Image: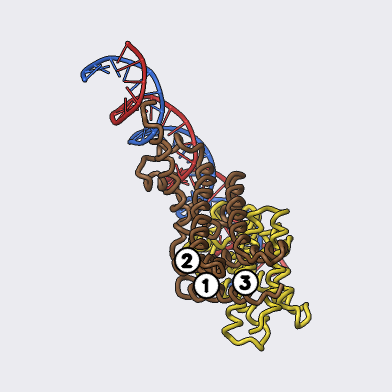
Chain colours: A brown, B yellow, C blue, D red
Amino acid sequence: MPWSREHKSQTRTRILDAAAAEFRARGMAAVAVSDVMDRAGLTHGGFYAHFSSKDDLAAQALLHASAQTTAAFDRTATAADDAGRLQAVIDLYLHPAHLAHPERGCAVAALGTEAVRGGRSVRRSLSVGIRARLDRLRRLLPGSDSRRVRDQKAAGVFACMVGGLILARGLGQEEGDRLLADCRAFLRSALADSPH
Amino acid sequence: MPWSREHKSQTRTRILDAAAAEFRARGMAAVAVSDVMDRAGLTHGGFYAHFSSKDDLAAQALLHASAQTTAAFDRTATAADDAGRLQAVIDLYLHPAHLAHPERGCAVAALGTEAVRGGRSVRRSLSVGIRARLDRLRRLLPGSDSRRVRDQKAAGVFACMVGGLILARGLGQEEGDRLLADCRAFLRSALADSPH
DNA sequence: TGTACATCAGTGAACGCGCGTTCACTGATGTAC
DNA sequence: TGTACATCAGTGAACGCGCGTTCACTGATGTAC
């Protein structure tokens, strides 16, 4: 075993980090394998010692990025007080900084419409990421709601978050920031009123 | 003028129809110019007599598709009774048939994350389409709401529609249909409660 | 302890395919006489 | 009315580039003696 046991797995992680960022920033189709390897500080020939294909990389990078996002959800929720957890996560997500930095943000909002059309493993990564986020949001809802209502709220809230970010990016910085604020206000009011 | 005046513009429309459907079904990057021309019943060499580049086609096809969607919004709203107009549009959008047929559906939900990264003209088409839909939805809201609240509701509702459809497609048919139903219920309740 | 060796992570050139774009052409059709 | 002509929509072959993938190699490093 001529190289340290962890050396290869560290390189692999470096490639995944680079891919997760590049893909979210520029889209899966527009990023070449050599772009990712450049960013990871390697030459493109070595790629296939770590991944079986670009599609394989895409599937794993999607999981990698999703794990970062769910971790951010958890950190934000933990830092907020009990009553404000859900709104804290919503405000983090529908924040101008998230609009401006897709490369560090939610992969569903950055790559959603492209990833659905990817290979089987890419689609599976996408659905896994979506389910994980829905699950996190559901747990932040008041326990007094029925399971059915919590399902509806989690779905509606996450849909509004993803759609809001995509629309805001489609409108550009200034107009987009205003739309994000409108979405935050909409959700705040929708979650406050609800007499379920 | 050896060809009838309208012949060329009819061909152009045929290419736009083909492109709007193919792009929404398979994504802009995955569809080749020759795929579009095949679908339009032409050979690929003739393409540049109608459009200056694939990007030009993408920008115009996006506008073409968006016009179809806003027309569908209008038809549905007109057919419903006064009180149910908005919910009728929401239910049409968050419908299993829309999940299953992106090629005839909303271009924002089908191509949103790809189109943001397109050229200047593609991005402009995207933002024009988004503004048109927001405008349509705003007009369906009760006039008793303030302008500010109508802005917030239109943004929140459309974000939830777009996000809901994208998430549902990411989850696949069966699980996606359930999520669509949850989003419809969420919006119904959010719009009913609101004590603004 | 030092040295020869085997392993395999990473290199860089090359291959082949698909796609956007170009271009010389063909032939259908409206117009002028 | 009929015919020669000019126009230009559409054809199909070709070009060139970029990208995913392969492969013969290099050289860094852990191990055996």
Q: Which quadrant would residue B113 be assigned to in this image?
A: bottom right
Residue at 60% across, 55% down? A130
**What chain letter is assigned to the residue under label 3?**
B
Mark linked to residue B158: 3
In the picture, measured across the screen, residue D20 lies left or right of residue B105, that is left
Disc 1 marks a residue whose amino acid type is Leu
Q: Which quadrant would residue A190 be assigned to in this image?
A: bottom right
Are the residues under badges 3 and 1 in a single subunit? Answer: no
What secondary structure is marked by label 3?
helix
Is C6 placed above or below B192 here? Answer: above
Residues at circles 2 and 3 in contact by the CB criterion of under 8 Å = no
**What chain letter is assigned to the residue under label 1?**
A
Disc 3 marks a residue whose amino acid type is Phe
In the picture, measured across the screen, residue A169 lies left or right of residue B157, that is left
Residue A58 visible in the picture: yes
In the picture, measured across the screen, residue B4 lies left or right of residue A44, that is right
Residues at circles 1 and 2 in contact by the CB criterion of under 8 Å = yes
Q: Which residue is mark 2?
A: A99
Is C24 placed above or below B2 here? Answer: above
In the picture, measured across the screen, residue A26 lies left or right of residue A195, that is left
